[in-house]
Image (cartoon, rainbow, N blue to C red):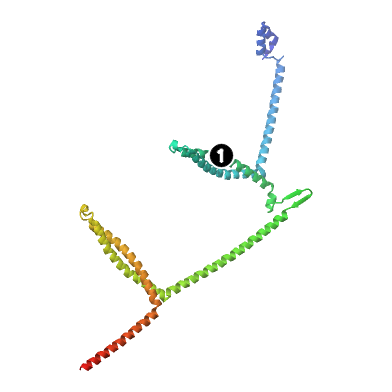
Amino acid sequence: MSAVSAVSRNEILGYATIPKRREQVQMIVPKLPADVSQLNRQTETEISNVRKALDIVRQRTLSLKTQSIALVKHPKFQTIALGGGSGLVIMGPTCCFIGCGVGVAIGTAVGVVPALFTLGLSIPVGAVIGGAVGTGVGLAAGTGGGLIVGGTAGHIGHTYRVEIKNGFLHIKTTTGERVVDLRAFFVTLAQRTRSKALEVTDMTRGRAISAHHLAKGQAIKLGKNTHDLIVHPKFQVTAASAAGGAAVAGAGGGAAGFVAGGAIGAAVGVLPALFTFGLSIPIGAAIGGGAGLCVGSATGATAGAVGGGATGYNVHTYRNEIRSGAKSAWTSANSYASVAKAKVVGTFAATV
């Protein structure tokens, strides 16, 4: 540094005798200080300025850190952040699904147009592209809207937390010099709503109890009517007659159906007998007999149950008339028998 300072700027420029060379040397060689002490003072001044700048940056950094911590710990910021995050989580996936569905529908509809030229490949391709675009748009719109709406709701909730905590919202409207307080209105409305809810609850409870008693009475009445019906002689006679008719007619119908079905099956089996070496005849008879047995049994049982039940019902209904007619017929038969007997005895006596 001393060797460089010993050479003055004029001495260096003295070597440049040509004007153009002198200009180049002036551009390359900086202006040297007069002595080393002046250079040291400049260096110390620059170092001091740098230290002051570092101190200012450090102080601002600490201040920004303190402010950030205070902001994060503030209840209002936490409420807004929680509301915004909740809105983002709720509305983001919802709008994403909606956008995906709408995009798939639109993409499918657009892909139908060139389907004839793409052999139908444009439909799934359009659906995939539309679903992807709809998903992206729905996700962006849902997250942005949910963040804004949730943050706004959190801000309003924190701002009016005292009023909301007290159970009503104190609204004041100012028109000129009049201030209308709506607190009493909301309190009265809440009391009316509560009383109406209690009234509806009592009414619902009373109706439920009445319905329970009515259903219980109807069930008891139905059970009693069923018991009376079962123990009634007419029902018992009708049921026994129906069961007997079903058993008799079912057996007869099953036998007849078995015989007829077997005959028809054997007749049908005769046609391919030449190709089955006669095995189709017994197989056809077995199949026809089984089918005829099932059909005949079902038909006979149904007809027997209906006929037997109707017969039993009518017999029990007109049992007195039938008993009277039978008694009258028996009396007439006895009188005819007595007359015939007297005639025979008289004839035999006259002959003897």
Quadrant location of residue 343?
Answer: bottom left
Quadrant location of residue 21?
Answer: top right
**Residue situated in front as seen by the camera: 197 or 308:** 308
Residue at figure coordinates x 51%, y 69% from the top left: 218
Residue at figure coordinates x 37%, y 80% from the top left: 322
**Residue situated in front as seen by the camera: 79 or 221:** 221
* SS at circle 1: helix
- Give the percent coordinates (x, y) of residue 204: 59, 63
Q: Can you name the residue that lies furthest to the top here?
A: 17
Q: Can you identify the residue that label 1 sits on? A: 137
Q: Quadrant of the C terminus?
A: bottom left
Examine the rendered structure and indicate whether residue 330 appears above or below residue 264: below
Amino acid type of the residue tagged 1 in the rendering: Val
Examine the rendered structure and indicate whether residue 326 appears above or below residue 180: below
- Give the percent coordinates (x, y) of residue 10: 70, 9
Q: Can you name the residue that lies furthest to the right here?
A: 177
Q: Quadrant of the N terminus?
A: top right
**Residue situated in front as seen by the camera: 340 or 113:** 340
Mark 1 crowd level (few <14, some 14–19, many ≥20, 10 Å Cα): some
Examine the rendered structure and indicate whether residue 283 appears above or below residue 144: below
**Residue situated in front as seen by the camera: 64 or 330:** 330
Residue 334 appears left or right of 163:
left
Looking at the image, can residue 46 be seen? yes
Quadrant location of residue 167?
Answer: bottom right
